[in-house]
Image: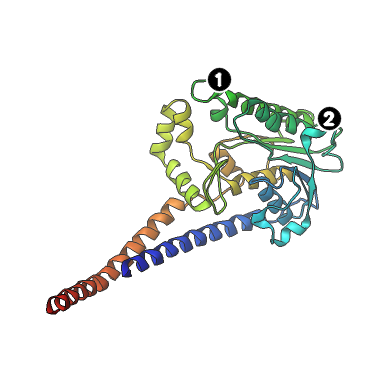
């Protein structure tokens, strides 16, 4: 029972450390995102604004003083930020982009920028094509005078697997949809790919405080550790030398905060347009801090192994003596 109690205490301590690391990292990212901006109350529409990435784009844009409208099918504030003060500064709008029946939704009307973080996953090719392609075409289409467009797509190394034996055939709908979204974002600003249009291409995105299976997701502390590990030179060299899906698996994932920061900066004109392909380019765009999850986990392990050793030196002899006493008592009976 003593050992079980200690195990539970160590488990709770580990969880507390993870939450502390994530809170510190989140505070650092928000501090960076709220630095002085020339947004001047710019109006920005975030498509998919209630999603994993989109909601954080809304958060960062409001911190920079932008007037933000979130567009999504539900129009509901996400659970993770439901009680956050900044959510009151966002206009949460429910729109089904696939029910527009071909008519213009004019999301860009009276807006300076459109950011689309809209994307779907699944196993149905047509649904993937509609959710990633048709919906984004509708979002960026219509009569628009937006100055900037931003689209969260997928890394070229991932999309390069399309049509190969590395991925199932139904994913062709996902890749084709992403290509449609990129083309629509570019067309929305008259084809200006140098300044007005920014395409952000992450591979795997991690973040938040929970794990998920569908879509697959790992939390911020764990993901930061993986990013730091796979950013080490030996893994980068190995990834360069390996083919297909193995190469993709060895590339460092992107933090949701880094992706959101790049989206917000691009929408407000803080960075030039173009393509940010992969974690390294996404992080560099807004000078993201180096991932430290692995280093922090190692430091935590060292510290707590030392504590465990100190505890064992005291408690184990006590347990041995207690056991001896019980054995002696049983012999006397």
**Residue 131 or residue 245, whichever sits in front:** 131
The first of marks 2 and 1 along the sequence is: 2
- Residue 163: image tag: 1
Q: Quadrant of residue 320?
A: bottom left
Q: Which mark is residue 303?
A: none
Q: How has the structure been colored for display?
A: rainbow
Q: Position of residue 68 (x, y in %)?
A: 78, 50
Question: Which residue is identified by label 2?
Answer: 101
Mark 2–mark 1 distance (CA, rounded to whole Å)? 31 Å
Quarter of the N terminus within the rendering: bottom left
Between 121 and 247, the residue placed more toward the observer is 121
Q: Residues within 10 Å of mark 2 (few under 14, many from 20)?
A: few
Who's the residue at 63% across and 26% down the image? 125
Q: Residue at (75%, 43%) from the top-left corner?
A: 72
- SS at mark 2? loop
Q: Quadrant of residue 31?
A: bottom right
Residue 184 falls in image quadrant: top right
**Residue at the (75%, 51%) spot, across then down:** 38
Against 51, is 161 above or below?
Answer: above
Along the horizontal axis of the image, is 240 left or right of 104?
A: left
**Residue 132: % across, % down:** 68, 32
Q: Is residue 161 above or below residue 209?
A: above
Q: Point out residue 58 in the picture as x, y percentages from the top left corner.
A: 71, 50
Give how far across and how far down residue 77 sits, in percent.
72, 53
Q: Is residue 124 visible?
A: yes
Q: Which marked residue is nearer to the observer: mark 2 or mark 1? A: 2
Judged left or right of residue 275, residue 109 is right
Q: Secondary structure at mark 1?
A: loop
Residue 140 appears in view? no
């Amino acid at each position: 029972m003593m050992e079980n109690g200690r195990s539970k205490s160590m488990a709770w301590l580990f969880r507390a450390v993870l939450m502390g690391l994530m809170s510190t990292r989140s505070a650092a990212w928000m501090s960076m995102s709220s630095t002085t901006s020339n947004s001047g109350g710019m109006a920005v529409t975030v498509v998919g604004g209630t999603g994993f990435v989109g909601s954080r784009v809304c958060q960062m844009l409001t911190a920079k003083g932008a007037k933000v409208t979130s567009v999504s099918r539900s129009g509901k504030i996400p659970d993770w930020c439901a009680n956050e003060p900044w959510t009151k500064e966002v206009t949460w709008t429910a729109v089904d982009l696939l029910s527009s029946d071909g008519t213009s939704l004019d999301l860009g009307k009276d807006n300076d920028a459109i950011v689309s973080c809209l994307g779907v996953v699944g196993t149905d090719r047509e649904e993937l094509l509609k959710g990633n392609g048709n919906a984004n075409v509708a979002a960026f289409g219509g009569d628009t005078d937006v100055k900037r467009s931003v689209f969260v797509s997928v890394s070229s190394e991932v999309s390069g697997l399309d049509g190969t034996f590395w991925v199932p055939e139904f994913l062709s709908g996902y890749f084709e949809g992403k290509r449609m979204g990129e083309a629509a974002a570019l067309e929305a600003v008259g084809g200006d790919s140098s300044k007005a249009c920014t395409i952000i291409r992450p591979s795997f995105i991690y973040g938040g405080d929970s794990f998920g299976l569908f879509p697959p997701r790992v939390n911020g502390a764990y993901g930061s550790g993986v990013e730091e590990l796979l950013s080490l030179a030996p893994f980068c060299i190995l990834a360069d030398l390996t083919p297909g899906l193995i190469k993709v698996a060895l590339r460092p994932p992107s933090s949701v905060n880094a992706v959101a920061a790049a989206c917000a900066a691009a929408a407000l004109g803080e960075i030039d347009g173009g393509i940010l392909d992969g974690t390294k380019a996404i992080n560099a765009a807004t000078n993201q801090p180096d991932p430290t999850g692995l280093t922090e986990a190692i430091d935590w392990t060292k510290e707590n192994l030392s504590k465990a050793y100190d505890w064992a030196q005291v408690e184990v002899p006590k347990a041995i003596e207690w056991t001896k006493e019980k054995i002696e008592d049983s012999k006397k009976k």
